[in-house]
Image: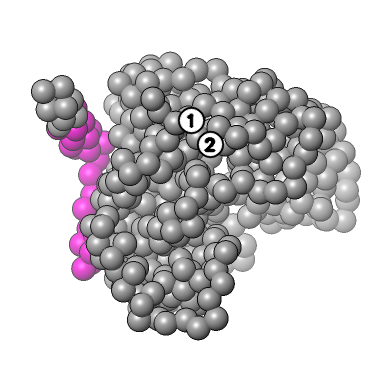
Amino acid sequence: MKREVLRMERVTCIKNGREVLNNFNFQMFEGEVMGLVPLDSYGLNEFVDCVQNNRQLFYGRVYICEKLVNTYAVCPRAKNNVYSIFKDENLVNNLSAADNIFIIREGFKGHLINERILNKQLERLFKEIGIEINTRKKVVELTILEKYIVEIVKAIVAKTDIIIVRDLASSLHSEDMEKLKKVIRYYAEHGMSFIYISARMEALSQMCDRVSLMSHGRIIKVLEHEKIAENLEKHYFFPYQLLENNISSAKEEGQKVFICEDVCYNSIQHVSFDVEKGECLLVHNYNNFEWEDFIAVLLGAKVNKGRIWWEHKGERNSEREVALILENPTETMLFPEMSYEDNLCLNLDHRIHYLWGKRSKRKSIAKEIAGEDVACKVKDLSLREKYELVYHKIILQKPEIIFCFFPYRNVDVKTRQYTNSFLKKYLSKGIAVVIITLDMMDSIALADRILLFGKDRGRMIFDREEFEKIAVRNRESDSAESTKKEEDTTE
């Protein structure tokens, strides 16, 4: 009989007078990789807080390893032995992997540290999972995949009860994701339990034993492994449509609005591409250069070699013809203490004279966009309202081209769909959109062309029809491989 490692019974949590978890029930067992799909973000952070930190409950009970750890009657102060992996926020960048794993953890009592012994122990752990990582490297020098593996091993060494993994697929290439999946499955087979939070069907169907669907602060359905892909695609995610999605009618063949020619700047080396008016270009980078460097170039940094061109570049206010939508835009592109209308009009003063001298003008614009007076500060808006503010702000700017950086990373299903709807609006207005992503399937339905940057200055460009043929072949291959594995298991 399987040992239960987590059970949440009728858990209800209140935040700012509202129920963020409502009669929430959740159960998982030892050695299980349990997927959690947030159809919206409602109550997701509170769920993690309950499991990890014993958040105060309005009603319900939480059991970990068959022991009652939290109840509405008593609010415990102790944290649970649960490890959460989200990006690389648990690691100290200036220390080695061995130091992070063995020394920077609760319960370490050593006074003398023998680095040689620590490195040997870590090499043995990496060898068990078939991964080669230089144990003497500082964390800041590791790749994203290596950092995630270091975090998982750190949790294993600390004898964690549950590891919560939050959408790591959005930060990894498909090859790296395959390696991470093998590591997670290896430890699951040896008794470790994982909660994998993601809105990516491919990762969920490949990695998870079961999947729970979460909406409006409650679990609405639990899917067994063989039902994951079929049910998610049919009932909860947008169907995989490639050619049925419209190409913008505003696209004008051959009219270039942006050219990047042999650009070299810090980690960017010899990058070249161009974008046409009204085109959606999907950019996928295997070369691991830092996109922060490309953002710096777009914002005016002087390149070491090559050129960046767009029409009217160098003229007054020409920088407004290029718009940026950064990762997590509700946090990176808004000023929380400023009013709604001031945030909305930040990039509008080149079109309207005396905009900042007359608040009535800004309020009038905001009312036209929002449909009503929005008197609160941005920090008091809902997540949906913040996204609306960001995307409307870009529309008012009227750029010729928009660079959208990792728009689907660590977001729920509804936010992904909402983002797609706004990107379609931009394209319908003749605005070119460049989407930078690590997962090509994120926005393939919108793309007119797909640009792949490989290693050693390699580059490949596909149109949608070409890429659809490749994607269909890959899906058929994956399906055949999955069927073969199931037959081998049955035998």
The residues colored magenta run 452-479
Q: Residue at x 55, y 68 (%)?
A: 108
Callout 1 secondary element: strand
Q: Horizontal and vertical percent for residue 278?
A: 42, 41
Label 2 crowd (10 A; few <14 / some 14-19 / many >=20): some
| The N terminus, quarter of image | top left
Three-letter amino acid code at the position of disc 1: Glu
**Residue at mark 2 to residue at mark 1: CA–CA distance:** 6 Å
Res. 439 image quadrant:
top left
Magenta-span inclusion, residue 460: yes
Q: Which amino acid is tagged 2?
A: Cys
Identify which residue is drawn at 55% across, 60% down.
Answer: 89
Which of disc 1 and disc 2 is earlier in sequence? Answer: 1
**Looking at the picture, how far across and down is residue 430, in whole percent?**
47, 39
Instruction: State whether residue 77 appears in this view.
Output: yes
Residue 65 tag number: 2
Q: Is residue 484 left or right of residue 81?
A: left
- Residue, disc 1: 4
